[in-house]
Image (tube, rainbow, N blue to C red):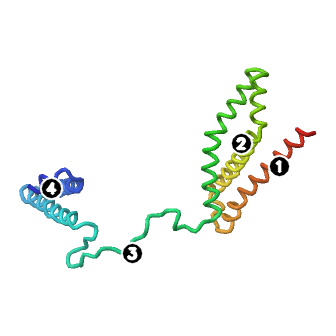
């Protein structure tokens, strides 16, 4: 009865395969009846041990040892147990800026291209919205996202090549990525501002 109930579990299937291997091994030596008995005896013995382990839970130890419930098990990794570093900031920014470029940047680009092709009135509407302070804030944010994602992607190319894993180099490049993105954004918008004024 117990064996039938257990026939659906993965553990029993593995044991059946092992028993079949033992059976073939003994049959190849022309010893059929003892081979069958030995193989199925092996399966039932293993199945009983496996069921006992399953019933006793994760604290099960080998025969003769105590059942000890582990107390100092490692915690599942989560952000609260890691010491924050620049590499973590760059990793999160890389994902966030990639999402921002996909969710907001792509529709803005399509809207801009459509407004150019649709005529002067549509383009004036687009420029009117984008020169509003909220529109400028969005454009500056998209510019920062583009630079940050680009520099972080270049950093990943270097890491994929196997370089930059030393602690000091990793910290240096991780700290440099957001700084370079901010400087590039400021330089580009300063250039745009001087061209618009001048």
Furthest residue toward front: 133
Mark before the other along the chain sequence, 2 or 3? 3
Tell me, for residue 187, which label it has, or none.
1
Tell me, for residue 138, which label it has, or none.
2
Instruction: Write down the residue under mark 3.
Output: 72
Residue 71 locus on image (x, y percent): 36, 75
Mark before the other along the chain sequence, 4 or 3? 4
Residue 53 locus on image (x, y percent): 22, 66
**Residue at disc 3, secondary structure:** loop
Mark before the other along the chain sequence, 4 or 2? 4
Tell me which residue sits at (80%, 50%) in the image.
186
C-alpha span from label 4 to label 2: 72 Å
Residue 97 locus on image (x, y percent): 64, 47
Mark before the other along the chain sequence, 1 or 3? 3
Q: Nearer the viewer, residue 139 or 57?
A: 139
**Residue at disc 1, secondary structure:** helix
Tell me which residue sits at (64%, 68%) in the image.
167
Give yes or no for contact between labels 1 and 2 (Cβ–Cβ under 8 Å).
no
Looking at the image, is mark 4 or mark 2 nearer the viewer?
2
Furthest residue toward top: 119
């Amino acid at each position: 009865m117990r064996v039938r109930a257990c026939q659906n579990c993965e553990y029993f299937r593995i044991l059946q395969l092992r028993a079949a291997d033992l059976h073939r091994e003994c049959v190849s030596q022309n010893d059929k009846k003892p081979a069958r008995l030995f193989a199925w005896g092996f399966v039932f013995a293993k199945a009983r041990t496996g069921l006992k382990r399953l019933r006793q839970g994760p604290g099960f130890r080998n025969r003769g040892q105590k059942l000890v419930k582990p107390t100092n098990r490692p915690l599942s990794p989560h952000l609260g147990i890691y010491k924050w570093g620049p590499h973590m900031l760059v990793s999160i920014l890389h994902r966030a800026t990639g999402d921002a470029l996909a969710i907001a940047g792509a529709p803005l680009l399509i809207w801009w291209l459509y407004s150019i092709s649709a005529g002067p009135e549509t383009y004036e509407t687009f420029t009117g919205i984008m020169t509003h302070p909220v529109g400028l804030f969005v454009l500056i944010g998209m510019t920062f996202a583009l630079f940050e994602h680009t520099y972080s992607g270049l950093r990943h190319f270097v890491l994929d090549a196997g370089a930059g894993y030393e602690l000091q180099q990793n910290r240096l490049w991780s700290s440099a990525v957001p700084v370079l993105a901010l400087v590039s954004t400021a330089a580009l918008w300063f250039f745009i501002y001087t061209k618009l004024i001048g």
